[in-house]
Image (cartoon, coloured by chain):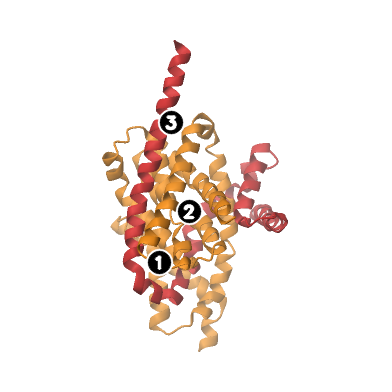
Chain colours: A orange, B red
Amino acid sequence: MNELWASPFFGIALSILAFWLGVKLQAKLKSALLNPLLTAILLIVGILSVFDIPYESYNAGGTVINMFLAPATACLAVSIYSKIQILKENWLPIAVGCTAGSITSMGSVYLLCRLFRLDEAMTASLIPKSITTPIAVEVSASHGGIVPVTVIAVIFTGILGSIFAPLLIKLFRVTDPVAAGLSIGACSHAVGTSKAIQLGETEGAMSGLAIGICGIITVIVSMILTY
Amino acid sequence: MKIIKQFGIIFTICWLGTVVEHLLPFAFPASVIAMLLLLVCLLTGILKVEHIREKSDFLLANMAFFFIPAGVNVINYLDILKTSWLPLLVICLVTTVITFAAAAYSIRLTMRLLQRKGGHKHE
């Protein structure tokens, strides 16, 4: 029986089915908590546990899907390029906001990890949690982090950001749409951006731009800190 | 053939990313190098968005899907999550608020300084 699960088609088909269910569920219940990626992960972990299917069997298909991560990351360039006009017009606030956001995120995570006495691997897994998953995964892996923990933390952060974005805008009295969009993107990447798009076109574009730029800044800062 | 060609372009850039990664004297993620290479190609006009539109739309629109296996791997780390789920949640919540505030205030300050500078010019 085990060799049937080990076919790569099983892992790929299960992933697609779980993701499709996740997307449908969110469309139906319209709740930010029901992030399709989170639903899919929980479903698959549940199915593998219940039917006692080894992770390695699932991962025969998983590695095929994984192969598309680098191309997907590269394509973030297309989304930065499509917003090049706004980037040119607001380059200084964008540069300052993304730099301040990225450094604050990494610094505050580091301090809190020390406070909670989490070990080095856990700290390395959480430091890139405010940036987009493809880049966060790379930063985590290259600093000895546990990649799946990073993925979970990144999704949690995104969900929190998209739920609290309207509240945070009021709390910190952010009236400028450029500042609102950038701040959402800086703290909660693509999941937060989906909320920013609902708030307005400028907010959405700015938030989307912050994803790529904060990602690059975080890579550079973490690289400098390790040397 | 169109889609195959677009796959070819993106995969070539990703491969060049790993080549550059090996050549660099410091560690820098290959996929981020590929992203910067693609951005340079678009900015210099070597590539047009049309050359890769369908493929990049497909990857960007379904980005979340490609992270499922990386997330499912958490099945091997459930012990860690069991012991530290609370700090993990607290850290995610607190730092998200702090990061938002840092970005928002620094942008507001920058915009005010720019306005003041702009104002002086007009005087």
Confirm or deny contact between disc 2 and disc 1 (CB under 8 A).
no
Do dots 2 and 1 share one subunit? Answer: yes
Residue B44, horizontal then vertical, whole percent: 68, 37
Q: CA distance from mark 2 to mark 1?
A: 23 Å
Q: Secondary structure at mark 3?
A: helix
Check the image and name the residue furthest to the top: B123
Q: Which quarter shows the C terminus of chain B? A: top left
Same chain check for tags 3 and 1: no
Q: In screen coordinates, is B111 left or right of A173?
A: right
Q: Which mark is residue A132?
A: 2
The image quadrant of residue B85 is bottom left
> A209 or A71, which lies in front?
A209
Q: Name which residue type carries label 1.
A: Leu
Q: Within the image, what quadrant is residue A23 found in?
A: bottom left
Picture disc at residue A118: 1
Q: Residue at x 62, y 43 (%)?
A: B39
The answer to whether B47 is drawn above or below residue B17 in the figure is above
Mark 3 or mark 2, which is nearer to you? 3
- Which element type, helix, strand or loop, lies under badge 1? loop
Please tell me how crowded label 2 is: few (under 14), some (14-19), or many (20+) other residues with Cα within 10 Å: many
In the picture, which quadrant includes the N terminus of chain B? bottom right
Between discs 2 and 1, the one toward the N terminus: 1
Residue A110, image quadrant: bottom left
Left or right: B108 in relation to B18: left
Tell me the number on the disc at residue B110: 3
